[in-house]
Image (cartoon, rainbow, N blue to C red):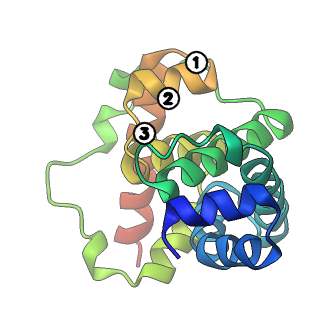
Amino acid sequence: MDDHTLVIECIKGNPKAQKALFDRFAPKMYSVCLRYMKKTEPAEDVLQDSLVKVFSKLSDYKNQGVLEGWVRRIVVNTCLDQIRKNTKFLGDIQAEEVEYKLEQNSFIAEQLMADDLMRLVQQMPDGYRVVFNMFAVEGFSHQEIAEQLGVTESTSKSQYLRARAYLRDRIEKR
């Protein structure tokens, strides 16, 4: 079933279509949730909340762009909402304060197994992890990240630089 038909059938309340939508997106979106939440239980909770939002807002989907991207945006925003509820974002720190930790050598992440890298990302402090995921994985700009998180653009940049330094440090220790 194509995305357009799937959405229409879900809006009509067709349980088979709803299950098909869940089966198509839940595994991928769970991995998105795991990147933002440190543990599986909160990731599962956010996934459930996200999918409830997806089903309740399906009538808002205008069939513009890819359905998976629309669903992913809801999942990411739900993760961010949950993080905002649970933690305070780290304060403003200028990017220049952490640049000394970064080297110009190429990043050796390609040598790590995906599970090892995921584990390292999950162990990051919340501010680092959120900005790293939004910038490096989801493709948000620092300006968009700043707007989403209610911080300055320089905070977003410094958190990203710190996340990279954190990963580099952990990788070099292996």
Circles 1, 2 touching at the beta carbon (< 8 Å): yes
Outermost left residue:
105
Q: Amino acid at mark 2?
A: Ile
How many numbered dots are placed on residues in this image? Answer: 3
Q: Nearer the viewer, mark 2 or mark 3?
A: 2
Tell me which label, 1 or 2, sits earlier in the chain. Answer: 2
How far apart are labels 2 and 3 at the CA level? 11 Å
Q: Which residue corresponds to mark 3?
A: 160
Q: Residues within 10 Å of mark 1 (few under 14, many from 20)?
A: some
Q: From the top left corner, tell me how far across and down residue 165 is, in percent.
A: 39, 49
Q: Amino acid at mark 3?
A: Tyr
Label of residue 151 in the image: 1
Q: What element does badge 3 sit on?
A: helix
Image quadrant where one finds the C terminus: bottom left
Q: Quick one: label 1 or label 3, which is nearer the N terminus?
A: 1
> In the rendered image, which quarter is residue 99 located in?
top left
- From this view, report whether residue 112 is shown above or below residue 62: below
Q: Residue at x 66, y 69 (%)?
A: 30
